[in-house]
Structure formats: structure tokens, C-alpha cells
Amino acid sequence: MKKTHIAIALLLAACGIIYADSLSSSIRVHVVARHVSSAGATDAPEVTYARTLTSGYSTDQADRTARYAGTVATSAPVSLDLVAGIEDSFGQVATFSSIRALSVRNESLANTIGITGALGSFTVGADGVALMAAPLDGLPPGTITVSLATGTPASFSILIIGTSQ
């Protein structure tokens, strides 16, 4: 049976028909802050967010992901056009019609980077992470620009999860 599946897959690939990719994504944030007063009273507020995206194009689904790692300098902002596409982990151009989640990691230990574009504007402090989980049906893509106001060049990485349709 296994040989038959391999033969069929090779035949379909030779004809230009390839099985569809699949993507499963999990977005999780869990923050707990335990506070003990000098009188011994405790408070442990927590915030939890968890969401799973299945493979597809509908509400709460995604079929595209791309990572970008780079360095930004004060005079050289980095722009990523998510509509035109950026290269994914497989060397293919990933184009987006909707963004489901965006994660930005600032690897600099000294500088704050700025993120602007169609998804809004925010900053990510030194050695910080920012996560944006879009509404269930996503946000429209556009260009994301990473900038650095002052200081030495800063390394960063971005992970984008979204849909192609």
C-alpha cells in the first residue's frame, strides 16, 4: 500500500499536480505575576491567551507563514511587503491576503526598534518581544517597516502567519 501511495505521488508530481501544503499554528501567551506584600498577603494575577489556527483560508485558519531575520540601522530601515511577498523557509515567495498573527523579536540588548505599517505602529524594547494576534478573520496585509531611531544596528526577527487567499 505504501509503495502505491509513493507511485501515485510521483506520477502526480510529474504531471505538475502536487499535494497541498498544510499548516497548523498555535499562539500562546501566559503571564503570571506573584506579588507578596510585607504583611504576607498574596496576589497572583495572570493573563492567558491561547489560539490554534488550522490549515485553510477561512475564519481562524492560516495557510502561509514566513520568517524574516535582519539587522536595522538608523539610516537604513527595513521594509517587508507582505502583499508582494517575502521568501518563506522553503525558498518560495509567500504572499499574504490576510494576517492572522505577527511576532517581532528585538535581539538588541541596548536599542528599541520601531514597527510601522498597515498593521499599526508599535515599538519593541531591547531584548523584547511583541505579539499581535489579529481578529479571527485577520487583518489586511501591507508593508511592515522596521526602523531604529538611535544607537548601534539592531538584529531582529519577524514571524508572520496568514492566508494566501
Image (cartoon, rainbow, N blue to C red):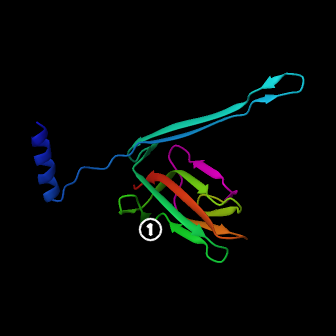
- Is the magenta region chiefly helix, strand or loop? loop
Density class for disc 1 (Cα within 10 Å; few <14, some 14-19, many ≥20) is some
**Quarter of the image where one finds residue 115:** bottom right
**Quarter of the image where one finds residue 112:** bottom right
- The extreme bottom residue here reads 75
Relative to 110, residue 4 above or below: above
Asked if residue 39 lies left or right of residue 72, the reply is right
Question: Percent position (x, y) of residue 94?
Answer: 40, 61
Position of the N terminus by quadrant: top left
Question: Percent position (x, y) of residue 162?
Answer: 46, 52
Residue located 86% across and 27% down the image: 37
Question: Percent position (x, y) of residue 122?
Answer: 68, 58
Residue located 51% across and 60% down the image: 141
Residue located 63% across and 51% down the image: 130
Task: Give the structural element (helix, strand or loop) at label 1.
Answer: loop
Relative to 74, residue 102 above or below: above
Q: Identify the residue position indicated by label 1 in the image.
A: 84
Asked if residue 129 lies left or right of residue 160, the reply is right
Magenta run includes residue 139: yes
Residues 39 and 96: in front is 39
Relative to 93, residue 129 above or below: above
- The extreme top residue here reads 40
Position of the C terminus by quadrant: bottom left
Query: What amino acid is found at the position of numbered circle 1 in the picture?
Result: Ala
Q: Which residues lie in the magenta part?
A: 122-141
**Quarter of the image where one finds residue 150:** bottom right
- Circle count: 1
Asked if residue 120 lies left or right of residue 160, the reply is right
Magenta run includes residue 130: yes
